[in-house]
Image (cartoon, rainbow, N blue to C red):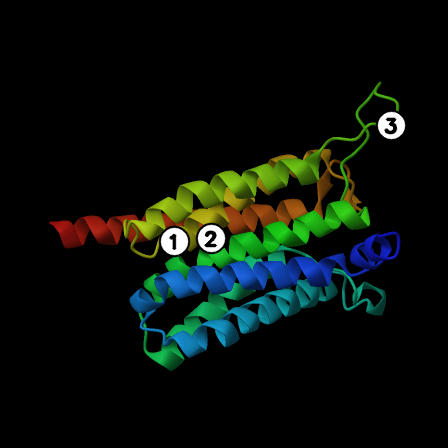
Amino acid sequence: MNEILPWGKEHALFLLLFFATAVCCVWLSMVRKRLKMPLYAVFPVAVLHTLIGVLSVKIFAFLETGFNPNSLGNMSLFGGVFFMPLVYWAGAKLTKRNLGLVCDLLTPCMIFTVMCARVNCILSGCCFGLPIPGMNGLRWPTREAELVFYLVLLVLLVRKVWCGQTHGEIYPLYMASYGAFRFVVEFFRHQEYSLGIFHLSHLWAAVSFAIGLSIYVELQAKGKKVRR
């Protein structure tokens, strides 16, 4: 047991991503008929989804530090937020599937994966909150708050997706809500790159909110025209 715990902590990210991939497999197997996905494709799609997600957060972290080679091991969750829709679009085009449906059904996988990545932040001791004034070094629980945010979002969105009550708006809702959440929580987080009380992540959060909200409003407007 004494040997297993250090090994588990050392390989926490791998284990968490493995768990996220397994959950993604279960979810895809449940909704694969709506995607017209054969059973044999579930596992490779789940693995590819995780691998591309990891690559996107690492690439984004590298880009936002100005191609600093020291940042190659870093991750920025905004990379997944901005890059994964492009992956969904490419996948929908290549497989001739409806983009809105693809985004709706894969967004839960995306949210669960980044939630697991945030758990790794707690285990590895990064992305922590600022010290709370007068609390003897106790920090704002920003990472824990983000986990609660993901859980609430999953409960709300998965229910809508499972009941077939969505028409492509799930990912824009995720982008907008995550952008709003991160913009607020960034005031309580420690950041290496900052300008006064504002961090670079404030910019990405605002962009995420603006893009998500604009797409959501556009989809809602189109939906009203169709119903008329």
Q: Secondary structure at mark 2?
A: helix
CA–CA distance between discs 2 and 1?
6 Å
Mark 2 neighbour class, 10 Å CA radius: few under 14, some 14 to 19, many 20 or more: some
The amino acid beneath tag 3 is: Gly
Tell me the tag on residue 211.
2
Per the image, the residue denoted by label 3 is 137
Could you tell me if the residues under marks 2 and 1 are in contact, i.e. CB atoms within 8 Å? Answer: yes
CA–CA distance between discs 3 and 1?
42 Å
Q: What residue lies at 38% left-to-right and 65% top-to-bottom?
A: 102
The amino acid beneath tag 2 is: Ile
| Residue 205 position within the rendered picture, expressed as x and y whole percent measured from the top left | 59, 47
| Residue 113 position within the rendered picture, expressed as x and y whole percent measured from the top left | 58, 57
Mark 3 neighbour class, 10 Å CA radius: few under 14, some 14 to 19, many 20 or more: few
Q: Secondary structure at mark 3?
A: loop
The image quarter in which residue 156 lies: top left
Q: What residue lies at 63% left-to-right and 63% top-to-bottom?
A: 18
> Which residue is more in the foreground, 30 or 140?
30
> Which residue is more in the foreground, 228 or 114?
114
Per the image, the residue denoted by label 1 is 215
Q: What residue lies at 38% left-to-right and 61% top-to-bottom?
A: 30
93 to the left or right of 23 = left
Q: Residue furthest left?
A: 228
First along the sequence among labels 3 and 1 = 3
Q: Nearer the viewer, mark 2 or mark 3?
A: 3
Please tell me whether residue 173 is drawn above or below residue 30 in the rendered image: above
First along the sequence among labels 2 and 3 = 3
Residue 68, can we see it?
yes
